[in-house]
Amino acid sequence: MRTRVTELFGIEYPIFAFSHCRDVVAAVSRAGGMGVLGALYFSPEELELELKWIDEHVGGKPYGVDVVMPAKYEGSDLGDAEELLGKLQGMIPAEHRKFLDDLLAEHGVEPSTEKAGRALLGWTDQTARPQVEIALKHPIALLASALGPPPADVVEEAHGHGVKVAGLASNARHARKQVEAGVDIIVAQGTEAGGHTGDVSTMVLIPEVVDAVGEDTMVLAAGGIGRGRQMAAGMALGADGVWTGSIWLTVDEADTPERALPKLLKATSRDTVRSRAWTGKPARFLKTAWTEAWEGEKSPGYLPMPMQFMLVADALPRIARSGDGELVTFPVGQIVGSMNQVKPAAQVVYDIIEEYVEALERLNTITEA
């Protein structure tokens, strides 16, 4: 395939694959797309190890890194990361802690035996900047900003390293802000997407964003995309390629939690919900007892980012390994209804391309008729 993004990065297919798993990132890049590693859950030291591994296993193919640098979050004026963590921990209400403890006990989740060490992660500007610094020491081709436009100095620094910058946008106004910040590629992400997402559908959003940013800015279609026909639709709407995420949760190489995988494979496209129950901002997850409890009458409500995640961070790994399993959830988009087999990542890439070609051939037949 030949589009502006394939020529820009020297890749065979305009398929970008977001994943927190290094094996998936490397596999997709080797297969002709571009893997993008989500840096959020890694400390700077861990990220260095992950990227070094990718460097050694990607076969010289290009890959990217995705960071979270939200423009607005609780405690943005509270000092460095260590100071911020301490102050925000003290701001979490006792009623929220009790609600969580009661919910975990109700579902038989084992009590905590150690202090959570990942309560803040890369949810803030202070904690994401070290991740950016590490990423730019490696031969990455793309730096993506997942929440809001990246700071101007980060864009400038990335460009200084010869790295292109992408920004996720859920409406046309956000897309224009990303362009003003200097990003090279807009990822127009519809509400069908997994994780943080807006409320405009992909079919409506893509042409709006394409028109809003103009022909000089490349756009990737995102939000519930995991099939070749959807890729063809995104390209027809004006996109230069597609940004995918959820479909890589059920590939052979993925490190999806053991108790979450069967739920993903069985879920339909109606089994997801947008909820603030993980991070404090709207994100799409599997609908489970966890999301229902936080929406229930007994819920004390959500805390703002990053405090909601700080509250639940210690509970999430315990939920994944103990209890009745009813609380187990996972960020995933509505494409989950098509994720009913475990395949190698490369096969998923080839399946998308094959179906894309079939869709084009069908359209050509219609046109000729």
Image (cartoon, rainbow, N blue to C red):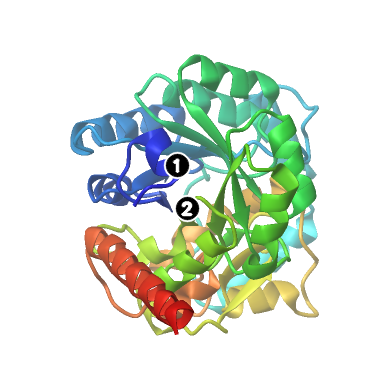
Q: Which residue is mark 1?
A: 5
Residue for point 44% across, 73% down: 229
Q: Name the residue: 32% across, 47% down.
A: 25
| Residue at (51, 70) in percent of width and height | 329
1 and 2 marks in contact (CB < 8 Å): yes
**Which x, y percent locates residue 206?**
64, 59
**Residue 51 visible:** yes
| Extreme residue in the top direction | 160
Say above or below: 39 vs 135: below
Q: Position of residue 298 (x, y in %)?
A: 78, 77
Considering only order in the chain, which callout, 2 or 1, is on the residue closer to the N terminus? Answer: 1
Query: Quadrant location of residue 278?
Result: bottom right
Callout 1 secondary element: helix
Q: Is residue 247 above or below residue 279?
A: below
- Rendered residue at 49%/20% (across/down): 133
Tag shown at residue 241: 2
Give the structural element (helix, strand or loop) at label 2.
strand
